[in-house]
Amino acid sequence: MLRNLASVGLIISSFAHEVKSLRSRLVPRTTFLQNELKKYISKNDLKNVKKDDNPFYMLQLIQEEDVKLKHWLDYSLSSLKRDKRKRANLNFGDYFERFKSTWSKAVEQRNVKIRLNGTKDAINIIRAFEVDMDSIFNNLLSNSLNSLKQKQSNDKFIKISWKKIDSFIEIIFTDNGIGLAKEYQKLPEEIFNSFETSKRDRKGNIIGTGLGLYIVKSIVEEHNSASIAIVNTIKGFTLKLMFPIRN
């Protein structure tokens, strides 16, 4: 067992090292190519060339894709941080600010806004593994983005509110997407069951693992006295999470 854990540790360390190296080269490489290209060709010389045949436009598209890839690599590296795997005092005000920053590029690309409503007061602290909070809220955000993708509107948002209620921190996570699929309207709690999913491709085939919300509920229930409940399923989707305050 120890030998296997050591092997996993080496693999993760190697992966993180290679990813950091790749990430650092992504965005600068297209800037370098553009500067080299300008030594031989002027943008004005290509003003009559079709956009899709213009090398400067091609490099712009590549750079945009590189920026997206860099975002996902940053997220992967963030998840591997050692301090996230240690139980510590976690201030939800600080945490959600980092959470919003981490996902900013991804949500902007989908024309979605993340709205935060809460404070960084010391009363908003719980004792937890930050990686557990990542598993919870990354899964919730992923589901919300999928729901919002199907909404025909320019007003798309995900709102996270938190406040102290008695000896708990209440977190309200909501989106204004299409809500739960019809098959879950009567018994919405079923979405927390393992392998439950309403996601389908264009041909109607089921996609996804159906484990996202099951993982969310399992992690919440592992925290002493914590709970999760569905508040709204029709006009968007809203969950209420309660975590005991760190004394």
Image (cartoon, helix red, strand yellow):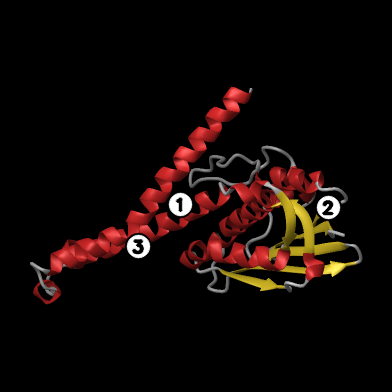
Residue 73 in picture, x, y percent from top left: 46, 52
| Residue with the mark numbered 1 | 73
At label 1, which amino acid type do we have?
Answer: Leu
* Looking at the image, residue 228 lies above or below residue 99: above
Residue 226 in picture, x, y percent from top left: 84, 52
Q: Earlier in the sequence, mark 1 or mark 3?
A: 3
Residue 214 in picture, x, y percent from top left: 71, 43
Residue 64 is labelled as 3
| Point 16% across, 62% down: residue | 53
Residue 176 in picture, x, y percent from top left: 65, 67
Residue 175 at least partly seen: no
Q: Mark 2 touching mark 1, by CB under 8 A?
A: no
Residue 195 in which image quadrant: top right
Number of marks in picture = 3
Secondary structure found at label 3 = helix
At label 3, which amino acid type do we have?
Answer: Glu
Image quadrant where one finds the N terminus: top right
| Residue with the mark numbered 2 | 227
